[in-house]
């Protein structure tokens, strides 16, 4: 009994409470990039297929491994006094605020490209903040407490999603959404940007993690890496924009495969740019290896022949709920629910259900082990998508909506907490930010790529079949967890 009480009191520790506020700072931008944005775009008259393509702004989260070594190693001018993690974290939070203000200054009905640029900057800044918060959490406590910190992080994350999801839609509804007025959504995004003050103050009043860092590359080389990184990104975007997809939206599979090939070619092109700078001597081949190769080889040496299987599991674990989640708001609107109902039941009560699920997931991992929690989370997350398939063909009913949203959010919160614990256990403290960013990048890449075409999939097969398909995507994940838990288990 005493041990159980002690376990529960861990949630009230200072480190746990700070992680609650950090979670709020991390969660605030996410729905402003996806869910709330999708409602704004629909109200602005943007087509469904274009709205779902905006989810590709989330590739910033999937690609953050590319700049995580810079964040992990490059010292900012004020880092000696403020702390390495804290200085980068503060910078990223200020970047989020500026990016949200930039987005708020746009009008997607007139300048859709400008809105896309603003949202991309929000996603980039938010992903950078995530790199720092993940490293901060992992470096602040040993592995056995990561379940608790993850639960508090997810609780804060979901409270922020409540604020930027339900709060933003409530505010928009109060200001008036019967007819489209861009100033309504601009006020919403200006208001949300001011709430980033929570994360900024938490960063200022937190202690720098007491971790000794081995500096393998000097700051001058880091700056060169940053310059090369920017040039490679410009090359990636330039090539992507100049390769048009010739297939009509009806040929969705071929269109998707072509898009995947286009992204692969853009990566190769960006890699060639980096290689040219290495061969020219502008950046060192040895330093490049220290920054990008060593974190990978460290992981491979640790898990040997099972490393690829673990990375594949990471890449597939959240595929069911991420692909489904992109069209959720569009589904609610087209089903017949109004913005107030979506804000109240999906974004308000749904967030509390997710927080509850997160606590269940963290506590389950603490008591029963990481792999059991991982399997349970994957099972209920995939199964909950079947409830959306049922809702798609069921009569319009608020009670049905509440039941489905509650079940889905509890399962999502549970799976999210379990997965964060698993990724934390895989991460080496020698390469905290870089390795965790790599894992979370792998986690998001394939789901985000598929999710970008979810609107087109719905156009062809309808919502019920689409939601059923996303549930089926979770089956291979369950089989992989069973196998990996036997051959490469995590020691809790």
Image: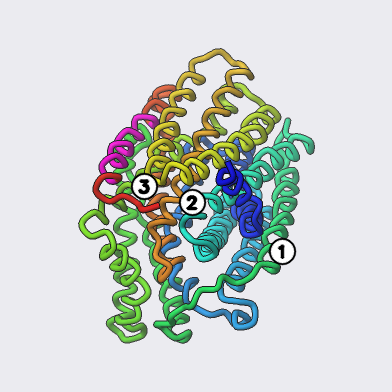
Q: Say which quarter of the image contains residue 221.
A: bottom left
The answer to whether the residue labelled 1 contacts the one labelled 2, judged by CB atoms less than 8 Å apart, is: no
Residue 244 spot, x, y in % from top left: 36, 50
Q: Which residue: 69% across, 63% down?
A: 200
Mark-to-mark CA distance, 2 and 3: 11 Å
Q: Would you name the residue on which mark 2 appears? A: 58
Residue 240, above or below 316: below
Secondary element at tag 2? helix
User: Is residue 478 on the magenta stretch?
Assistant: yes
Secondary element at tag 1? helix
Q: Nearer the N terminus, badge 1 or badge 2?
A: 2
Task: Judge by depth and name the residue closer to the eye, 71 or 94.
Answer: 71
Residue 348 spot, x, y in % from top left: 67, 35
Q: Quadrant of the N terminus?
A: top right
Q: Say which quarter of the image contains residue 458.
A: top left
Residue 458, above or below 73: above
Q: Which residue: 30% across, 56% down?
A: 264
Write the start and end of the magenta stretch as one range: 470-484
Determine which of the numbered discs, if any, sits on residue 446 in the image.
3
Mark-to-mark CA distance, 1 and 3: 35 Å
């Amino acid at each position: 009994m005493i041990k159980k009480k002690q376990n529960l009191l861990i949630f009230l520790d200072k480190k746990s409470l700070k992680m609650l506020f950090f979670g709020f700072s991390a969660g605030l931008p996410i729905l402003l990039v996806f869910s709330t944005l999708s409602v704004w775009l629909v109200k602005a008259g943007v087509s469904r297929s274009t709205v779902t393509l905006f989810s590709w702004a989330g590739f910033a989260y999937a690609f953050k491994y590319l700049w995580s070594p810079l964040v992990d190693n490059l010292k900012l001018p004020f880092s000696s006094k403020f702390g390495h993690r804290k200085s980068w974290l503060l910078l990223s939070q200020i970047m989020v605020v500026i990016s949200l203000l930039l987005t708020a200054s746009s009008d997607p009905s007139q300048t859709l490209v400008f809105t896309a640029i603003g949202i991309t900057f929000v996603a980039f800044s938010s992903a950078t903040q995530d790199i720092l918060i993940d490293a901060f959490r992992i470096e602040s406590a040993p592995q056995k407490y990561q379940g608790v910190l993850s639960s508090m992080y997810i609780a804060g994350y979901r409270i922020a999603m409540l604020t930027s999801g339900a709060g933003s839609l409530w505010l928009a509804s109060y200001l008036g959404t019967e007819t489209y007025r861009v100033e309504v959504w601009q006020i919403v995004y200006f208001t949300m940007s001011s709430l980033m003050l929570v994360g900024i103050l938490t960063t200022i009043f937190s202690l720098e993690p007491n971790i000794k860092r081995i500096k393998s590359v000097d700051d001058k080389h880091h700056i060169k890496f940053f310059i090369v990184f920017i040039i490679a990104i410009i090359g990636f975007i330039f090539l992507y924009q100049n390769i048009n997809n010739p297939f009509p939206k009806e040929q969705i599979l071929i269109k998707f495969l072509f898009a995947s090939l286009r992204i692969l070619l853009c990566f190769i092109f960006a890699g060639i740019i980096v290689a040219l700078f290495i061969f020219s001597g502008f950046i060192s081949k040895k330093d490049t290896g220290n920054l990008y190769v060593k974190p990978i080889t460290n992981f491979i040496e640790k898990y040997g022949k099972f490393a690829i299987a673990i990375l594949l599991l990471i890449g597939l674990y959240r595929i069911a709920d991420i692909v489904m989640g992109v069209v959720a708001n569009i589904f609610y609107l087209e089903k017949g629910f109004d913005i107030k109902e979506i804000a109240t039941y999906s974004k308000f009560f749904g967030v509390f259900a997710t927080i509850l699920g997160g606590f269940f997931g963290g506590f389950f991992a603490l008591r029963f082990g990481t792999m059991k929690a991982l399997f349970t989370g994957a099972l209920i997350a995939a199964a909950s998508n079947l409830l959306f398939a049922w809702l798609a063909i069921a009569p319009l009913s608020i009670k049905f909506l509440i039941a489905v949203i509650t079940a889905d959010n509890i399962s999502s919160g549970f799976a999210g907490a379990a997965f964060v614990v698993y990724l934390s256990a895989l991460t080496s403290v020698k390469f905290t930010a870089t390795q965790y960013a790599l894992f979370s990048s792998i986690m998001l890449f394939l789901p985000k790529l598929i999710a970008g075409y979810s609107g087109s999939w719905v156009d062809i097969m309808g919502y019920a079949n689409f939601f059923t398909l996303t549930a089926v995507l979770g089956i291979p994940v369950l089989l992989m967890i069973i196998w990996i838990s036997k051959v490469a288990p995590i020691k809790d």
